Every structure is written in C-alpha cells, then in structure tokens.
Image (cartoon, grey):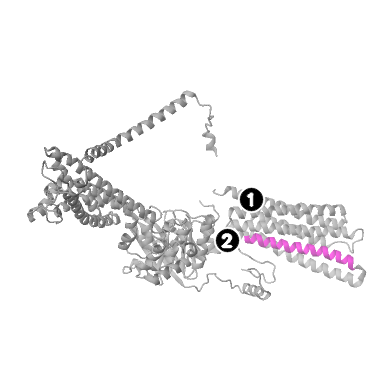
Amino acid sequence: MPRDTFEKQVNDLKKTLLALGALTTQTISDGTEALKTRDRVTAQSLIKQDIEINRMRYDIEERAYRLIATQQPLASDLREIMSILLIAIELERIADHSKNLAEIVIRMGDEPLLKPLIDIPRMAQLCESMLGQALDAVARNDSELARAVCNRDEEIDQLYKQIFRELMTYVMEDSRTVTRALNLLFAAHNLERIGDRVTNIGERVIYAATGRLEELNVENHQMVE
Amino acid sequence: MLETTQSERLGIFTRALSGNTPQETSADTKTKMRVQNLDFYYGNFRAIAGVTMDIPEKSITAIIGSSGCGKSTLLRTFNRMGDLVGHTRVRGSVTLDGENIYDRNVDVVLVRRRIGMVFQRPNPFPKSIFDNVAYGPRLLGVGGKALEQIVEQSLRDAALWDEVKDKLHQSGLALSGGQQQRLCVARTIAVKPEVILMDEPCSALDPIATYKIEELMIQLRNEYTIVIVTHNMQQAARVSGLTAFMNMNPDRAGVLVEFGPTTQIFTNPAKKETEDYITGRFG
Amino acid sequence: MNQTQNHPRTSAPLLGMSKAHFARRKITNIVMLSLTGAATVLAIIPLLWITLYVTIQGSRFLNIEFFTQLPTPVGVPGGGIVNAIVGTGLVVGVACVIAIPVAIIGAFFAADYPNTPLGLAIRFGTDVLSGIPSIVMGIFAYTIIVLPQRRFSAFAAGVALAIIMLPLVLRTTEEMLKLVPRGLREGSLALGASNWKTSVQVLLPAALNGVVTGIMLAIARAAGEAAPMLFTAFGSTGLVTDLNESTATLPHTIYIYAMSPFKDWQEKAWAAALVLIALVLGLNILARALTWWRARQMGLNY
C-alpha cells in the first residue's frame, strides 16, 4: 500500500485515543465511588490523574495537527483524524466532570450525605457503560453502534430529572438542607453532562464513518446537513 | 479586516442560518458545455470511453485522476486540440451553448477562439511581452490604440501588469516560469474566450507561482468558465466548485468515475474508487 | 525490503584500493583521452591547412585593383576580377530568389503533413535531388533555358544553382521546424490562429536561426560550384549586370585561370580562391551575427 506509514500513524493515534478513553471511563466509577464512600484519598488521586489525562489529550491534539499539516488527509482520512481530535477533547472534558465529583467529595469534608445514593450510582453506571460502548464504536468505526449508544442518553436525562425533583422536595421540606442538596445536584449535573458528551462522541463516529454531520438527541432528531 | 460591527456580525450569522453561502455552485447555474457519451480513439485504441458531464457556466471545474487516465486527452477534446494528432476519432458530442463543436460544418478556428487553452509548460512565443498578448487580437484585425488597451487590460486581468509594464518590449521568454504562465493566461484572455481550458497549468511552477495562478483563476471565475486538469488534488480542492474523478477501466480507456461538488468529493466521495484515489490508497 | 539483504552493498574503503588497480585505471583514462584528442586534431588539420595555404598563396597577389579592375589579357600585369565577383553575386542572388521561397513553403508542408503522400514525395524528392551531381544541374539548365534562348545567361546559371540549393534549404528548414516545441504551435492554434498564420508568425520566427544557417550553407555550396557554370553562365571578360547575358563567376574564373599554362593567371587563381573563401566565410559570420543578435533580443534560444 502506498500509504503504510501514514496509516500506521493514524492507527497509533487511534490507539492512544482508546487508551485515553479507558482511563476516562475509569475516572467516572472512581469519582462516583469516592462520593459514595466519602473517600478523600481517592478523590485527591483523581484530581492528580486529571493532569495526566490533559497531557494525553494535548499529545493527541498535537499529533493530529502534525498529520493534517504534513499528510494533507482527505475524505475518510480527514474525517477520521478530525474525529479523533474532537473525541480526544470530549474525553478530556468527561474526565473534568469526574474531577468535579472528586472536588465535591473534598468540599463536603465530613458532612454527612443528604440521603443514601441510589440514582447517582445508576447514572454513573449508565455513563460508564455508554462511554465503553461509544469507545467500541470508535474502535470499530461503527455508526450503528454509535447511534444506539446515543439513544441511551435519554435514560440519563430521565434519571437527572428524577434526582432534581427528589432533591427539590428535601429543600422544600427543610431549607437548611440546601447546601447538601446542591452538592448532590451538582454531582448529578456533572454525570448528565457526561452523557451529553458521550453523545457528541457518537456524532463524531457517525461523521467519520459516513461523512454525515448529524446532531443526535435533539427533540426531533433533526439533520444539520 | 476582521473588525466588524455587531450588526455585520449578526448579518453573517443570519446568512449562515439561511444556508446562503456565496460562490457555491447552485443548481440553477447554466450549463456552458455538455459532454455526452464521448469516446476518443487514437487509431484503434480507445483512450476515452463514454464520458458524460455538464460543465456549468462561470465556475471552475476540476478534472483529477492518475497519470495516463486520459484527463488531458479529455480536456483537449473540448477545443478540438485532439484533432492535431493524426488518426484520431471522436464519437459522442461536446456542445458549447448547445452547438456541437464536432459538427461537420463547424470551423475549428472559431471553436478555439471561444474556447481558449493554457498549457502545462508555459509556452510564450519567442516575441516581446506586448506581441505575445497582442497576437490573438491582431488575428482578429485589432490594432492601434484599441490593441494597446486590450494588451494592458489583459495583463492587468492576469495580474501581471505591474511586473511587466516597464518592459513590454522585452522578450516574453525572459520572464520567470510563473510570470510566463500568467503571460500565457493574459494572451488567452486577450481574445475574450468564453471557456478557458487549463492543462495542469501549475505543474512546472513553484508553490508561490502556483498560488498566484490559483488566485488568478478565482478572479477569472466571475467572467469565464474554467476547466482545469490537475495532478494536484489540493489544487482542485482549493479552486474548483465541481470535481470530476477519472480512472482507467480494464481496457486502459479513461472513464469518468465520479463527478460532483468538490467539497463532497474531498470529504465524502460516493465511490470507493474515488475514496481510494483521494486518500492515496490507489491500486 | 528483503531485496536489500540479497543484494549487499560493496562499501569498499575509499583509500584501500590496490595500487596496481588504481594505476591501470588511470592509464586507461589517459590513453582514451589522448586518442579522442588526436582524432579531433586530425579532423581540423585539413581545414587549417587549406585555409592557410590559400591565404598564403592568394594574399601575395591581392590588392585593391584585384577587386575593382576587369581582367587583363595574359602577360599584361595588374587587372582584377570584379566581373567574376559581381557575376557570382548576381547568379547566387537569382538562385536565392528562386530557391528560398519554394524551399521554405515546401518545408512547411513536409513538416506539417509528414505522412501524407505529398509530404513523403517532397522528402523523397529532395533526398534524391541532393544526391544528383551538380554538373547534371548545369546540363539541365542548359537544356531547358540556354538552348531554347540560344544564349548563355546569368539567369540560367541562377536556375541551376537554385536546384542545387533547394533540397539543402528545404531539408534544413523542415528539420528546424520539427525542432520548434509543439507547445508553440498549439499555443497559437489555441488562440484561434489558422495553420498558415501559425506557420508564418510563430513557427518560422522560432526556427529562423536554423533556417538562416541552412540558407548560408546552401549559398556557400552554390557559390562554389564551377561545373554548372560551364554550361550556363559561360564566362565573360566584361562587367555584366544583365541577367540575360553570359557572365563570369568566381569558381569558373578560378577554374579557367588555374587550368591555364600562364604563371600570372595561376597566381590570380589563388587570389580568386581566397576571395571566394573570404566571401563565403564573411557571409556566414554576418548571418551568425544577425541571428545571434536577434536571439538575444528575444531573450533565449528555443
């Protein structure tokens, strides 16, 4: 093949992306676990790990720029490299959301939780599983799988609304719980954002595979182009 | 200038929302040249097989493809330059504004006056810069003050005037390669053709000269229909509105594989053959 | 990748070569260089010899009178060959006027349509024509012009020389036209120029250097022809400017003088030979200078 070197570079880049993805997936469960067990040590290490994740993202970004500048990728190559670049950014943001969970743990200190965590771990689990699937879709360039993953975002949104309503009842009953309720709401909000970002990853996979720019999970699944 | 007022910025946003981007080839553009079921033979060898394409007016259409796939041959059938080689034969038709240029009663000289050509290697005549540009108009009997005006205007349109205005009577061959090619463009537009065919016009030029020619093409697009054959895919991507991809079929005849909007060809081609060529995974 | 392993690199050390090997290579080089040099010298010896000999022999008898006076009878000192110089100019001029236009137009046709029957005929015909001995051209002109008119004439001599020049000019012009880059021709045609305009306005100027060289060679050849002159120009002792009169020419004069038993005529033959050589050489230099100047005007040579 005339472009073996180039192809190898793109594959290596993709492998790095998937490694970043694995690391990011881990941060979701670590963050949630730290929240559940109030484990400030884990929380601290998560915050430290974020530096590593950011570094990886810049590495991917730089390599993608270099490929674009030196290889002038076109058609599916162009779409793939652009998708890798954008997915790396989404992954790094997801890790930031996990870091936010860790920061909540540290901020709360020894203050007891408002209520036992039920829906938040479910949300987290859903996020983790969706991200795992989305990464599979990335690896296999599978637009169908990507579409299926994105459809699950609705479940996350539903859970978020449910948590919101539940926390509101606590606050209405006793306004002194407001700080503790907001802490949990903030945690849930971060998980909800992770779901949205996984959807973005799915959109990138679909673009890389088919060349179509679609915005998923808008009310009527409207096509942008 | 990137300084804009709030209302200008809003205007840009509104236009973007309504999907009205300027300079894109739209569906209602008039077809200038229509190629139908075109076959071209050198003796018994079929070099082009069954090409059909519509070339829209006042736009740049690029033809890309690997070496020897017949893209230059195809281009040369558009102004009957292929006739110059002996034992050639054409089947099918090429029409200019609805008239078949291969009709028995068509004067080939008139065809070439309306469809000009710029070649791969700059080929100024061994004459002065002025005489090079004046050559075409003089054939039409233009002289005197009118001729001087045409020469100046053509050189201006070819973005060469400022570089040569003080040495119009020096030889065209004393110019640099890029200047020579712009001189050839000036020479071509001096006879005001409707279509300009460009056969790999930048293949002998350095990058800066190449960008100058490309910039020139984009300027000329407003008044001329341009068809360019290029080896340089990036060049096709930069300048053209439509791109045609040609390839060889198993009989070694050139066929048109895909023809469509340049953006689509370069980001999401419909045919795998095109994809393989564009991404450099050919063969 | 694997091929490189099967085909190892020699990587001989640069300074480790054996002395004998090195010496042999050096000697071979010197021998070959000497051989080519010797051959070159051998080739220019006749040229230098002839030129020098004629110059030495001829210059002794050259003076102003030789260029301005008519010939004197045997034994009478002084006198010149002005009649032969003018006569040669006259005859060659006629030949050029007839041969050059025909040759150039024919060359265009042969170059433009090389594989047509007429194109092939032109090429074949000129090849045959250039192989015919010049004396035959003389007899031909004698038969078709001198005999019907019942007089020798400069015109008949011009026709004979024109036939000699024609194939030379035609073939060199044709070759020069073929050397003009195809792009120039296409560039002109693409501007809507006809074949004819393209030939005259683009191809001929581009090929002009070569064409002029061809013409010069043909003139040199024609001006030196003595044999056809015997049947056509015939010779004359007076100064002739009328094309219908017989006239003296340089080669003919050289022939007559050199063949004569008289010492002073033989000496004049050397001088006349020198004039002929100088004339041809001068014309050549002039033409080269003109085309060089023109090429410089146009920037570059094609």
Q: Which residue lies furthest to the front in this view?
A: C77
Q: Secondary structure of the magenta portion, mostly? A: helix
Q: Residues within 10 Å of mark 2 (few under 14, many from 20)?
A: many
Q: Position of residue A197 (x, y in %)?
A: 72, 62
Which disc number belongs to residue A11?
1
Residue B260 shows in the view: no
Q: Quick check: is C181 in the magenta stretch?
A: no
- Which one is nearer the viewer's eye here, C211 or B255? C211
Vertical relation: B140 (above or below) C301:
below
Q: Where is residue B137 in the image (x, y as percent from the top left)?
A: 38, 68
Between C287 and B201, the one lying in front of the other is C287
- Name the residue at 32% across, 63% down: C197
Amino acid under disc 1: Asn
Chain of the residue displaying label 2: B
Q: Is residue C272 above or below residue B69?
A: above
> The N terminus of chain B is located in which quarter?
bottom right
Highlighted magenta segment, given as a residue range: A178-207
Q: Identify which amino acid the numbered label 2 is placed on.
A: Thr
Secondary structure beneath disc 1?
helix
Can residue C59 be seen by looking at this rendering? Answer: yes
Left or right of B126 in this view: C171: left
- Spatial distance from mark 1 to mark 2, Cα to Cα? 19 Å
Q: Which mark is residue B267?
A: 2
Coordinates of residue A120 in the picture (x, y in percent) = 82, 62
Residue C83's spot in the image, x, y percent?
16, 50
On residue B5, the disc is none
Q: Residue C256: which quarter of the image?
A: top left
